Amino acid sequence: MNLRVLIAPLAALLAPSLAAAAPILSFEFNTPGDTEGWQHNGGANGGTTGLTTVTTSGGEGVLTSTTLGPATSGDLRVLYNPDFSLPAGFDSWSAVDIRFRQLDDQGAPRDLAGADSSLHLGINAAAISINGSGFVEETPGDQEFWYTATLDISGNAANDITQIRIDPITTLRSANYELDYVRLSGVPAIPEPASLAIAGLAFVSLVTRSRCRD
C-alpha cells in the first residue's frame, strides 16, 4: 500500500491541532419575515422606535432595520440577546464577521461616511468593539456599497457571548440599513495527548500490516 495513503488518516486525526478557525454560528437571513432572533434597539437620541424585519434585496435575504421616528433621532441598532456558549469541540472564539450596507432617506444604497458606526460584542458583560474605520467596502467603486467587518474575539476563550449589537448608522439620522449576514467562528480544540497517542498507534499498526502484506 502507498505510504501516502496511510498518512492521510493520521493527518485527518491530527487536523484539529493544526486547523484554522471554523464556523460555529451563522445568521444568513434567507427567509423573509424571519429575523432569527434579532431585534431592533432604538438607542440614544430621543428614544427612537424602529422596525427590524427580513426582506429580499438584490435577490438575497437581508435583515432590514428601519427608523419609525423623526429623521433627527435615528441611531438604529440591532441586537442579538440570547446568551450562547462555545460548543463542544472548540477551545475559543475566533471572530465575528458581518456584511451590511447603509441606505439613504430615499432607500438607495450610499457610501458609509465617517467612523461613527460600530460593531459591539458583549462577553461576560465586557464590550468588545470596532468602529467604522474597520469596515471595508467590499468592492470599491461599486454603487451597491456593501461593507464587511471582522471583530477579533480570539482572546476570549470559552466565555459565553451575552449580546451582539450592531450600529452601522453614522450621521445620516434618517437612514436605514440592510444586514446580509453575521457569522461567528471559533478555534477547534487540540486533541488530548492520549488521543494523539492512540492515533499514532493506529498509524503504526496500519504501516505494519501493509508491510506484512507486501
Image: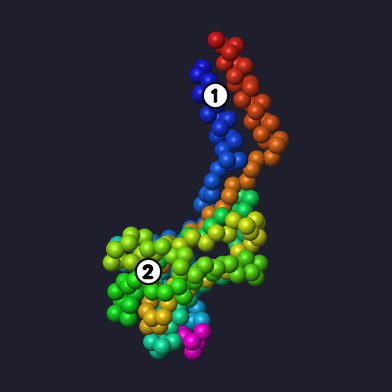
Q: Where does label 1 land, which residue?
A: 6
Amino acid type of disc 2? Arg
Numbered disc in front, either 1 or 2? 2
Left or right: 7, with 105 as reference point = right
Kindly give the residue lying farthest to the right in the view shown.
Answer: 194
Residue under the point 65% across and 60% down: 159
Task: Give 31 or 88, whichever is nearer the viewer.
Answer: 88
Task: Give 47 or 72, whichever is nearer the viewer.
Answer: 72
Location of residue 211 with respect to 111 vertically, above or below: above
Dividing the picture into quadrants, the one containing residue 178 is bottom left
- Asked which secondary structure carries label 1, the reply is helix
Disc with the residue nearer the chain's start (1 vs 2)? 1
Left or right: 73, with 146 as reference point = right
Whether residue 106 appears in this view of the structure is: yes
Dividing the picture into quadrants, the one containing residue 101 is bottom left
The verdict on residue 110 being magenta is no
Residue under the point 64% across and 69% down: 126
Measure the alpha-carbon separation of dots 1 and 2: 49 Å
Give residue 101's mark. 2
Task: Give 49 or 74, whichever is nearer the viewer.
Answer: 74
| Local crowd size for mark 1, using a 10 Å CA cut-off: few (<14), some (14–19), many (≥20) | some
Amino acid type of disc 1? Leu
Main secondary structure type of the part rendered in magenta: loop
Q: What range is drawn magenta here?
A: 44-51
Q: Could you say where residue 83 lies in the image, as x and y percent from the top left?
A: 60, 66
Left or right: 208, with 194 as reference point = left
Location of residue 102 with respect to 197 vertically, above or below: below
